[in-house]
Image (cartoon, rainbow, N blue to C red):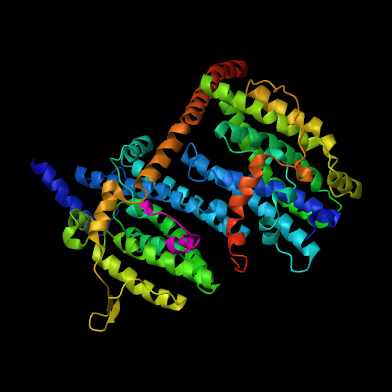
Amino acid sequence: MKWDTCDASVQYLLHLGDDALILGHRLSEWCGHGPILEEDIALSNLALDLVGLARQYYQLAAQRIGDGMTEDRIAYWRSDREFRNHVLVEQPNGDFGDTMARQFYFDAFHFLQLEALQHSSDIELAAIARKAIKETTYHAQHSSEWIVRLGDGTDESRVRITASLLRLWPFTSELFEPSSVDRAAHAAGWGPDVASLRGPWLDLVQEVLEHAELQLPESPAKLLRGKTGIHSESLGFLLAEMQSLPRAYPDATW
Amino acid sequence: MAPKIDMEARFLDYVSAENKVEPKHWMPDAYRKTLVRQISQHAHSEIVGMLPEANWITRAPSLRAKLILLAKVQDEAGHGLYLYSSAETLGTSRDQMIDDLHTGKAKYSSIFNYPTLTWADMGAVGWLVDGAAIQNQVMLCRTSYGPYSRAMVRICKEESFHQRQGYELMMHLARGTKEQKAMAQDALNRWWWPSLMMFGPSDDQSPNSAQSMAWRIKRKSNDELRQEFVDKTVPQAEFLGLTLPDPDLKWNEERGHYDFGPIDWAEFFAVVAGNGPCNTERLEARRSAHAEGAWVREAATAYAAKQAARRAAAAPTAKASAA
């Protein structure tokens, strides 16, 4: 299967699905290890929503590819060079502050992205977005509340969340740099011009940071090309773990 | 001393007549203590029990399986919450109970000190471990302490769903490739005996059982529950085409029950004493999650206190401006 030459609408769905799957997978790594039981439940909920969303995108992609393609073949049989997620979402969990900073940046982007996708000319994609935006609204509320709590909590939490926000900041630039698939999707009316989301995203982020009495981080953008399949080194390990069983028993079904 | 004896006798009459005890009722100190020990141990089992299953969430072999497993482990966290809350009604805080777990003062079910080595363990744990737990928990839906009994009703509904998911997974493997079937059999071999041990020592070796039965906390003996579980599980294993690892297992027409071989109680007591394959890792995982999360909990508490102070400071002003 040549993933980079398949139909543009399929490539766009893979990009959307990969963000959801990889971030959901990362969040699921917290299960059983959260800072408090209530948060263990909350992080699992985010993971369930995101992996569930990935399945919807992949199922639609599989249907469009045809030929017996399945969601699991899409998730378990592509290599790291064939994944199209943003480098931000594959970043390791770090501590709770790092996880929340990653989530906060992504949730604000995801919300704006889904807001646009609700009006996609691809009606099946629009239907998925309408359902997902309800969940994402809660995700954004949850991560924003934690940014405020950690920013305005103790001296230690303030130092730690400030460091996390700064550490993850350089990964946010990729969200607003259109790939060729983003451009094709925008031209066809399927999705937003991601560059245009940067302003509203900054407004959302800034509002919460002000509330938390935190500064907008300042650090140069990184050169990132996750959307074209050039990832950080951590994705290979994530996929090696995630894909191990189907690849060890290629004749089996699960 | 005389009035105290009266109270205890009255209490015994009250529970014997199948009445529920509620948090504000008078109860013997020993009843309260027994319940805190039992409910907190049960809560700890839910929380520690998340670990062996969470071990496979990142390796679940299909997206559907990943969601099912994640949702299941999340349910266990929810059960832990109901149970801690129910134990708190007896006057012991969640923090205290968690400290007791971390210092080794409180126990949790020994079954979670065994490792989950293959994907088939997710099936075997759901089918056998949750199955054995349900056997016990269905009985506890009728326990005499109201908040515990009501928590158990909710928990049982979810647990029986988990058990069916576990059985479905085993069935899928048992009907899969040769390797998958072998994986399922291997998991059954490793989990069968520890599951039977989950019901605890035989009745004559179980020091707290008689008193708990009199108080209607416990409704059936360990051996009765174990026998019910064996009787229920043997045909399920047959249906899967898997073999239970017990050469002495056979139907006893006269008793109307399956006979089964002797349980290795030396193994049971070794695991209870802390020498099972994973005791150290499980407790360490809990301790380190708690320690690493301390700054987050402190921040949340400090923020809540600041917010409350801000509200208090704002309130008179609001009143003044309204006037």
Q: Nearer the viewer, residue A219 or A235?
A: A235
Counting from the top left corner in percent of width and height, residue B32 is at 25, 44
Q: Is residue B28 visible?
A: no
Q: Quadrant of the N terminus of chain A?
A: bottom right
Counting from the top left corner in percent of width and height, residue A76 is at 66, 57
**In the current view of this chain or complex, which residue is farthest to the left?**
B2
User: Where B229 falls versus B157 (above or below)?
Assistant: below
Q: Is residue B95 left or right of residue B31?
A: right
Residue at left 23%, top 55%? B15
- Total labels: the figure holds 0
Counting from the top left corner in percent of width and height, residue B11 is at 20, 51
Q: Nearer the viewer, residue A37 or B323?
A: A37
Q: Is residue A78 left or right of residue B191?
A: right
Q: Nearer the viewer, residue B244 or B154?
A: B244
**In the current view of this chain or complex, which residue is farthest to the bottom?**
B253
Q: Which residues are magenta?
A: B112-125
